[in-house]
Amino acid sequence: MSAVAPGPAAPGPAEPGPALGAAQLLGPTEIRALAARLGVQPSKRLGQNFVVDAGTVSRIAGLAGLRGDDTVLEVGPGFGSLTLPLLAAARRVIAVELDPVLAAELPVTVAGRVPNLAERLSVVAADGAKVTDLPGDPPTVLVANLPYNASVPVVLHLLATVPSLRGGVVMVQAEVADRMCAPPGSRTYGVPSAKLAWYATARRIGSVGRGVFWPVPRVDSGLVGISRLGADEAARVRGSARRAETFAVIDAAFSQRRKTLRSALAAWAGSPAAAEEVLRRAGVDPALRGEALGIADYARIAAAAFPVAGPAPDTISKS
């Protein structure tokens, strides 16, 4: 069960407020003091690297392109350094935090630093890769500082289960950012880029040095801008294919990345000959490798293997 700490049920529409002053934002001194008071040590298991630079969080909030009527879904708020500028720019923030101590403290921090914005915050103590119950209005924008080991599963889960999200900005390990945004045919193109393309377009919109985090990670980070496909574009990309079956094709194709599709999909299809038959029905050359295909190609393969009568049930409405 997710623990929800809601604000007032229905705040009125809000215009974006002025940028918060330096005294309202959290810096390294304030975050370390909070950590000491709470007895919190950053957890490697949870992938906790907290942003301690006020300029960086203000930049991320600005890149999110928030409107006054937006509801932000923030995953991994930590001590709340990014939460504060998000509250100033949006109508509401739903913060999903896995660490129960940090989840309980976040409303206290917000009330102490921006009491006039405290009613805009709801906190959910849950795993961002599993959360399903979100309070209040459906969120429209995702903004997140994601643990390196869980970033892609979190993004895919939320795009699948929160159809109201039109896009957002996520901060992930630089290498993961490259993979999320890679086009077909590139060296870094793979499962993350192909599956993300089912839902949205992704592009690199910035870099973040390791020095803005506490503790300092061993890698740099990247900012990825995500824009969900519109209904017409989603229908063009997916055709009649279903998501689960398309993703199974992607997993099989990249499980043996260096092999041709005829060989890589043999176990999935039942034999190399069966794989070739499906590929030819889909109009895909069996001699290609998985890295050469875009999401529309994978969808055609899935549809050729599992034809359905009429539009697939999750082609547009669920994702």
Image (cartoon, helix red, strand yellow):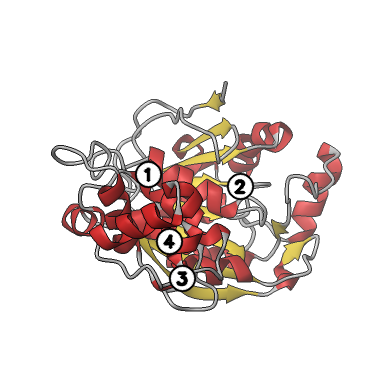
The residue at the point 66 percent across, 57 percent down is: 148
Q: CA distance from mark 3 to mark 4?
A: 9 Å
> Of discs 3 and 2, which sits in the foreground?
3
> Of discs 1 and 4, which sits in the foreground?
1
Q: Report if the CB atoms under discs 2 and 1 are less than 8 Å apart.
A: no
Q: Amino acid at mark 2?
A: Pro
Residue 83 point in image, percent of width and height: 55, 50
The residue sitting at the front extreme is: 273
Judge the density around disc 3: few (<14), some (14-19), many (≥20) Cα neighbours within 10 Å.
many
Specify which label sits upstream in the sequence, 2 or 1.
2
Q: Quadrant of the C terminus?
A: top left
Residue 60 seen in the current view: yes
> Is disc 2 placed on a helix, strand or loop?
loop
Residue bearing mark 2: 77
Q: Quadrant of the N terminus?
A: top right
Q: CA distance from mark 2 to mark 1?
A: 34 Å
Image quadrant assignment for residue 276: bottom left
Residue bearing mark 4: 194
Residue bearing mark 3: 291
Residue 21 seen in the current view: no
Residue 129 point in image, percent of width and height: 55, 40
Q: Could you tell whether 105 is left or right of 120 in the image?
A: right
Nearest the viewer among 132 and 153 is 153
Nearest the viewer among 69 and 182 is 182
Image quadrant assignment for residue 214: bottom right
> Is disc 1 placed on a helix, strand or loop?
helix
